[in-house]
Amino acid sequence: MTTTGIPHARFVPRRRLRRAAAALLLLAAAATCKRGSPPVPQPDVALAPLVLDVPAAKPADGGTTPQATAEPPGPPEDPREALTLRTYDVLLDGSIACRATTAGVVIEEAAQPERPRRLSVVHLPGSVNDVAWIGRVQPPRPATCPEAPGGPVCPIPPPVTLVAAAAGPAGVFLIDVTDPEHPSQVGTFDTAGAAMRLAPAPPLLWVADGSGGVLALDLADPARPKAVAGVSEPPAAPEPAGATDAPADTSLVDAPDDLPPAFYVRDVVPFGERLFVAASFRGLLVYDVRAAPGGPSLEPRLTFDTPGDARAVAVDGDRVWVADGPSGLQVIDTALHRPDAAPAVVATYPTRDVCRDVKLDVNRDKTLFPPVAYLAVGDHGLEILDASDLSSLSVLGRHVPRRPVNRVTVGPNGLLLLANDADGLMIVDAADPTAIRQIFPAP
């Protein structure tokens, strides 16, 4: 049978099924092709920049780039350097200052007081308590001379310029400072006690030797100083009336452990034909110095017990100014030139701390300037007293550094050099004691 017009209805669903199946096959083939292709980055995702490890560019001058290196270690610090600051005394001669320190003797140029310049350090085995200027000394010819054609030749050694150092238990050291930048030790003397203070009286050097008493050294041969006089015990005290020769019964007496030394000399000052001695708890001692073969002799002349601990003395005629430790300042009229008078205290001044040193400006013109006394009072620094009226000592000025003042040295034109303990040297202008001005270090 022949058909015409619209297809038969039962054939329509089959054609649709075939079309759907073909579409599914095409989708499956497309998925298979996509899985086998490499991934393509999305256009809106930023890629991390590529960093290349390239060598650094050379400098413009064609040289090599310096590499950072560690600083080379410097020379090891000398542990003694810190000890050169702690100062116990200052010596001034011209423009040369010598400091007595824990490390030894420090030599400085002080021509410009506001800028002292270190020249050298002489390290010594003991802490130095004091330094003294001896001056020019001509050493003797050597005892033995080298042989030469025509006989032995004995060259005259060159002169030396001596400074002496009191180094406590280590004794006394003699230093040649002819060239202050290159000093040299030329001699030493081991004292029996502890060398505290020195007083030159050429050709002798007097030594306050602590428990060793008083000692006189002959410096004619600086390489071989020798002791020529001394006293190791205090003068005998006068016996009280009615005393007997029978020994005292001390069997039941226990001596305390804190007794002061029986004899301890802290300072010596030669004045004319006498020697004035600060003997700690024994007070002030005065000896007549008499010439004798082989060396001078010391004859006791006066013993005056001060209330404190006599540490230093300054002499002005018959009057002696005593730095008496915790008892401040004591001014004693020794009456040595008045046989009918007795020694007595004529003035006292209670310092605010232990009175360690006293100095008088003996070269000051008393007709133009009132006499003054300079006191080193430890933690309370420097005190300057008006000494024109001993019946009423008064303070003209004070200067209190942060460190204790151990000693004071009087310089020219009102300058004072202070041994300022751990802060070393301090220089002040005290031309006007009422307006003391610190010069070094700069305030």
Image (tube, rainbow, N blue to C red):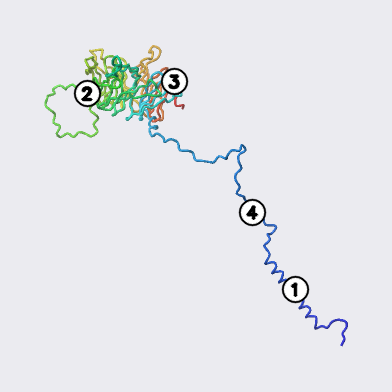
Q: Which residue is mark 3?
A: 111
Tell me how far mark 3 sits from mark 1, CA to CA: 114 Å
Residue extending farthest top: 367
Residue 286, located in which quarter of the rendered image?
Answer: top left
Q: Which mark is residue 175?
A: none
Q: Position of residue 204 (x, y in %)?
A: 28, 18
Say whether residue 377 is visible.
no
Tell me how far mark 2 sits from mark 1, CA to CA: 137 Å
The residue mark sitting in front, 2 or 1, is 1
Is residue 25 rendered to the left or right of residue 50? right
Q: Are marks 3 and 1 in contact (CB under 8 Å)?
A: no
The amino acid on which the numbered mark 2 sits, given as a three-letter code, is Pro
The residue mark sitting in front, 2 or 4, is 4
Q: Compare marks 2 and 4 and give the one earlier in the sequence.
A: 4
Tell me how far mark 2 sits from mark 4, CA to CA: 98 Å
Q: Position of residue 139 (x, y in %)?
A: 31, 18
Q: Which residue is mark 1?
A: 23
Q: Compare marks 2 and 1 and give the one earlier in the sequence.
A: 1
Q: Which residue is mark 4?
A: 48
Q: Compare marks 3 and 4 and give the one earlier in the sequence.
A: 4
How many numbered marks have been drawn onto this rendered protein structure? 4
Q: Which residue is mark 2?
A: 234
